[in-house]
Amino acid sequence: MFQAHFAGMNMTENKTAPTRDEILELEKQVWAALVDGNAQADRALLSADFLGVYPTGFANRDDHVGQFADAPTMAKFELSDTKLRVLTPDIILLSYRADYLRPGTDKWEAMLISSLWERRHDVWVNSFSQDTPLEGVG
């Protein structure tokens, strides 16, 4: 039986994983940027190598931030049914249901989202998001 031994090395540097509420608060900041039309806040929350997987295709950080070119993309949102998977103390997967209202409409839409958050240089950034629309909601 082989056992790796790393003398004097603590691979997690005694970091504790964040709580579901802490990661959910970060996710809500992304949504708030969509409501406020705040591209700068959105860019700060996404990693430089961000990858979005959406029904319209793949998106990088510039694509995500670019949606603010004309105006806010959301009017209201509610996040529910949250599930947290701690992959490491520095890599967290948050999955949840988002119900949202786009500006200029009264029809609510919904999707399931999985969002990967990573602690890089002691800053949490969203590095990946996949959105799955739920049909027949509204």
Image: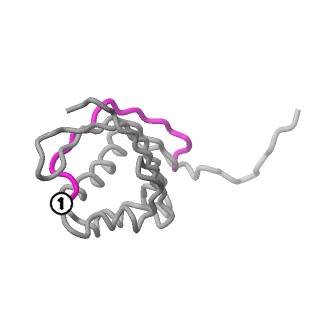
In this view, 3 is above or below 126 = above
In this view, 37 is above or below 8 = below
Q: Nearer the viewer, residue 18 or 8?
A: 18
* Mark count: 1
Q: Which residues are magenta?
A: 72-90
Question: Residue type at mark 1?
Answer: Asp
Name the quadrant containing residue 68.
Answer: bottom left
Q: Which residue is mark 1?
A: 36
Q: Nearer the viewer, residue 92 or 101?
A: 101
Q: Nearer the viewer, residue 16 or 120?
A: 120
Q: Where in the figure is residue 51, as x and y percent of width and height?
A: 48, 57
Q: Where in the figure is residue 47, as x and y percent of width and height?
A: 45, 63
Query: Residue at 24% across / 59% down in the picture?
Result: 33
Q: In screen coordinates, is 67 left or right of 123?
A: left
Look at the magenta stretch and give its main secondary structure: strand
Q: Where in the figure is residue 79, as x and y percent of width and height?
A: 27, 38
Query: Residue at 41% across / 47% down in the picture?
Result: 55
Q: Quadrant of the N terminus?
A: top right
Residues packed near mark 1 inside 10 Å, few (<14), some (14 to 19) or many (20 plus): some
For residue 100: magenta?
no
Q: Quadrant of the C terminus?
A: top left
